[in-house]
Amino acid sequence: MKAFRKLCIVVLVLFAVLAAALNIFMIQHRNYADGQYRVEAKRLADEIAETGSYDLAQYPHLTGVFSGADLYKSDEHYVIIEAGGTLYRVEYETVNQNALIIAVNAALAVLFLLLCGVFVYIWRNVIQPFGSLNDVPQELAKGNLAVPIPEQKSRFFGKFTWGVNLLREKIEDDRQKELSMQRDKKLLLLSLSHDIKTPLSAIKLNAKALAKGIYTDEEKRRAAAESINVRADEIEQFVSEITKAASEDFMSFEVVQGEAFLSQIITKIHARYAPQLGLSGTEFLIHKYDDCILSCDADRLAECLQNLIENAIKYGDGKRIEIGFDKMDGCELITVTNTGCTLDEKELPQIFGSFHRGNNAEKVQGNGLGLFICKRLMSLMGGEVYAEIQDGCFRVTLVVKLA
């Protein structure tokens, strides 16, 4: 805010200095214009004295030359000159420079007031509303979700404050979901650990009995071994449940199924990545497509495409990324291809798992969730995703149902 005040002061001072300089220039020009008729009258006197005649067309500020009985009979501006021993009355015209100076200053005054009005408008409708939101992001980052967010009716910040409120509510909702998930996981682990103790105790008892040779009958030893195997299967099932809970339930996905034009999504992707890839020298191709209506969540589908393009940027060779299109069995196929694939083909079945990173990801930062998220989102939207390697290019295809 202080910077804006300083900017206003500097601009207004510069405006005042320029206005003063313009006035000084106009006053000097007026004085020069007022003296022109004297110069021309002196030149006229010299011409008459030398030639005995004159050409009035050469003197733009002079309107008439009179002598004799008409020497002093005039209602116009005039000056008396002497040439060759004769007096002459030379009439001249004057330009009303004062009116021009007044008009220019009036215009400058209007511009000055208009400039002040613009600054006041910006202060009230932009600077002050934005200033009231300065601390909100920091408070949200600190975890203070109760920070007050003033409502703004301004068309500049009304949507912004509404969006910040939505963000705060989303963070609060995610926090509650995370707490609920952590609580459920804790209860699950406690329950499973308790359930594991029973078969584990049975395994220990049977193992000790077998180790000490308590069972002399071959049938009893076989029954003890089978009991150990059954209990081990129970423990393996519990471990599988723990693994599943840890790998699949750590993220929640919300999809609002609807309809969207394909062009709407592709236009957003092009606007997002074309400038960036152009600066990096990567060829970004979007093939021709027939615009159609897709059955999907437009934001989530765009998120999937963004994940695929981000992966192409990270793991490709930076030469070319392209988006291709096809139709099959009532579905739109959207394929993102990047050159320079170094992934082993045997890893393709695992790349959609959570936290899985291929052998080509050693020097690239990431968490191995991009393709996993795509898989989950496409499944929730009733679609599919698959990957393949062709001619050294990595291709991922989203299968989206047509509306």
Image (tube, rainbow, N blue to C red):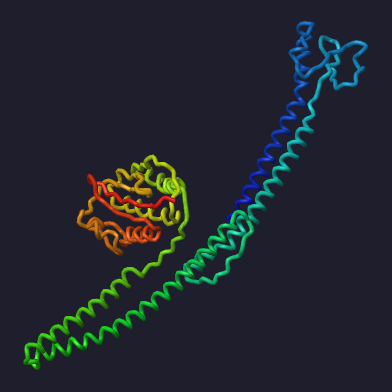
> Where does the image place residue 67, in percent across and percent down from the top left?
88, 11
Note whether 264 is above or below 244 in the view shown.
above
Quadrant the N terminus occupies: bottom right
Note whether 286 is above or below 384 in the view shown.
above
- Name the quadrant containing residue 123: bottom right
- Name the quadrant containing residue 255: bottom left
Going by the image, does 267 lie left or right of 208? Answer: right
Q: Is residue 340 visible?
A: yes
Q: Nearer the viewer, residue 373 or 378?
A: 378
> Where does the image place residue 46, in percent across and percent down from the top left?
76, 12
Q: Nearer the viewer, residue 165 or 289?
A: 289
The residue that appears at 86% across and 12% down in the rendered structure is 66
The residue that appears at 50% across and 64% down in the rendered structure is 167
Going by the image, does 389 lie left or right of 286? Answer: left
Note whether 401 is above or below 102 in the view shown.
below
> Where does the image place residue 72, in percent across and percent down from the top left?
91, 17
The residue that appears at 63% across and 47% down in the rendered structure is 11
How many discs mark residues in the rendered view?
Answer: 0
Going by the image, does 308 lie left or right of 254? Answer: left
The residue that appears at 29% across and 75% down in the rendered structure is 241
Going by the image, does 253 lie left or right of 212? Answer: right
**Which residue is the extreme one toward the bottom?**
214
